[in-house]
Image (cartoon, rainbow, N blue to C red):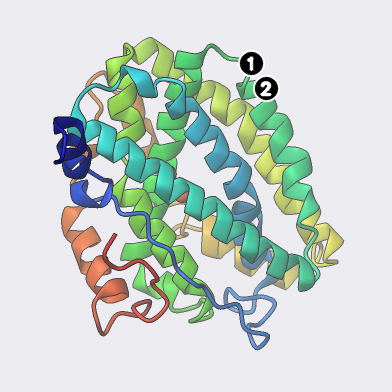
Amino acid sequence: MASSSTVTKIRKLTGAMVGIPPRHIDFLFPDTTPKYFYAGNATATTFFVMLSGFFPPGERYFMESVRHFRSHVKDETLRAAVSGFMGQEAIHGREHDRMNEFLAERGFDMEAPDRFVKIGLGILEMLPHSTRLAATTFMEHFTALLAEQLLNDDGFRQHADPEMIKIWQWHALEELEHKAVAYDVYELVGNTQTERIAAALASMIVLLPMLGITWTWILAKDKQLGNIPDNIAGLLALFGPKGFVSQIVPRLPEFLQKRFHPNDHDTTELESIWRDKLFSEEGQLYAQHNNRIA
Ligand SMILES: [Fe+2]
Ligand SMILES: [Fe+2]
């Protein structure tokens, strides 16, 4: 006979039940993938190489900062959302590790992100636990903005290699699905605007130089720093008037507002469109998605 605790376990909500399913995907990194997978441009490509190198250690930092306060979460829906967040971020780290091995085989110096970004994260680890979580909520805001831009910007995506863009689209969708989780946990442990501002500043002061150094290092080791036409075209694609990064910068300060919440900016329709594009039976990743029921 099933005990009441067994019944409780069976009914326990999962991340998938609250719209945050950790999806196991077999991404393909075929030999035919061009080395400069973004528009044949080394400068823009290495920006994404740098980001991919940052993700595994960065996402472990995010997970650790949320895990520290997991016991504070009593609400069953938020507990399930935290499980979904942990699952998604763990798989993101694992898949970017795989991608980073492929990029290393292609000749990019993938030890550079580890060397430099870990210095920055090591400094952020000295902060009090609640400030670390506040820093995570800021970086989740930043990644959600990047994700939304990537999914909305058809012109930008069209310049990317069609196979390589899939991992970025999957990651972007899941960043939007779980964009409020760390913040909702932070609300439980005492969200203050002052701490959020301090954490955002600390994150930018510590991480932006490290990301810049990593990007420049990878580009220099690849002998493409000083390839002026390539450098200018890549910088314009990212930081020009209609550049990929330029378009998210105006929205970064939303995080500093007193009454900020990630869900105030509704992305549910965009998420639904992309769930369909990627994971419906005709979707780009349907055949590579290994745990469809989850
Ligand atoms: Fe992620
Ligand atoms: Fe995330």
Looking at the picture, how far across and down is residue 10, in whole percent? 20, 44
Quadrant observed for ligand 2 in the rendered image = top left
- The reply to whether dot 1 and dot 2 touch (C-beta < 8 Å) is yes
Name the residue type under label 2: Ile
Separation of marks 1 and 2 at Cα, in angstroms: 5 Å
Q: Nearer the viewer, residue 28 or 226?
A: 28
Disc 1 marks which residue? 126
Residue with the mark numbered 2? 123
* SS under mark 2: helix
Which x, y percent locates residue 289? 38, 72
| 97 up-or-down from 79: above or below | below
| Quadrant, the C terminus | bottom left
Q: What residue is at 55 percent from the left and 51 percent from the top?
A: 93
Residue located farthest toward the front when viewing the structure as drawn: 1
Q: Is residue 221 left or right of residue 34?
A: right
> Picture coordinates of residue 258 (x, y %)?
26, 18
Who is closer to the viewer here, 22 or 125? 22
